[in-house]
Amino acid sequence: MVKRRSKPKKRVSRQKGFSVINGAETYLLMNVATQTLFKTNPVQFLTSKGAQYSSYITLQEILKPAGRFYDKPDVAGVQGPGYYIMRNLKENWVSGLSGMILIPLAFRAGKSISRPVITRTNRLLGKAGVANTVKL
């Protein structure tokens, strides 16, 4: 059978660049997760060394747990970072779960309401020549 002539398929161009709105949503979701598990924000979790008797847990303390986690003789047995993470999770699970559900819903509603503004702004960014770097 002879192949029919057809129009060439349109290629869908993939959007390039960093989306500021999606970045803000991701940061807020990471903030909820780190507040729930470690009682800190993402920047402090990644960069701080932690303090001896602070209530927050950092990444460095999880990777090298020798310090404050094992210096409490009044706690029955040796409690590592997992014990404190679970304790934080038990205390903060309601706010963490509600934040993980409500933040994406709020961003979805906000994006749909402000779609015309976002489209115009992205078009202006394209005319300015920075659409491959940043978009709304």
Image (cartoon, helix red, strand yellow):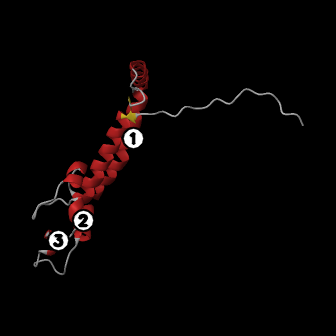
Q: Amino acid at mark 3?
A: Phe
Residue 53: image location, x then y, percent: 9, 64
- In what element is the residue under mark 1? helix
In this orientation, which residue lies closer to the viewer: 59 or 84?
Answer: 59
* Sequence order check, earlier mark of 3 and 2: 2
Residue at image location 22% in from the left, 73% down from the top = 80
Quadrant occupied by the N terminus: top right
For this orientation, the residue located farthest to the right is 1
Residue at image location 83% in from the left, 30% down from the top = 4
| Residue with the mark numbered 2 | 62
Q: Say above or below: 114 vs 68.
A: above
In this orientation, which residue lies closer to the viewer: 28 or 64?
Answer: 64
| Residue with the mark numbered 3 | 69
* Sequence order check, earlier mark of 1 and 2: 2
Residue at image location 40% in from the left, 22% down from the top = 129
Quadrant assignment, res 106: top left
1 sits to left or right of 94: right
Q: Amino acid at mark 2?
A: Ile
Quadrant assignment, res 117: top left
Query: Residue 105 — which label?
Result: 1
Camera-side mark, 3 or 1:
3
Residue 46: image location, x then y, percent: 24, 54
Decide: few, some or many residues near mark 1? Use Cα within 10 Å; few <14, some 14-19, many ≥20: few
48 sits to left or right of 124: left
Q: CA distance from mark 3 to mark 1?
A: 37 Å
- In what element is the residue under mark 2? helix
Camera-side mark, 1 or 2:
2
Quadrant occupied by the C terminus: top left
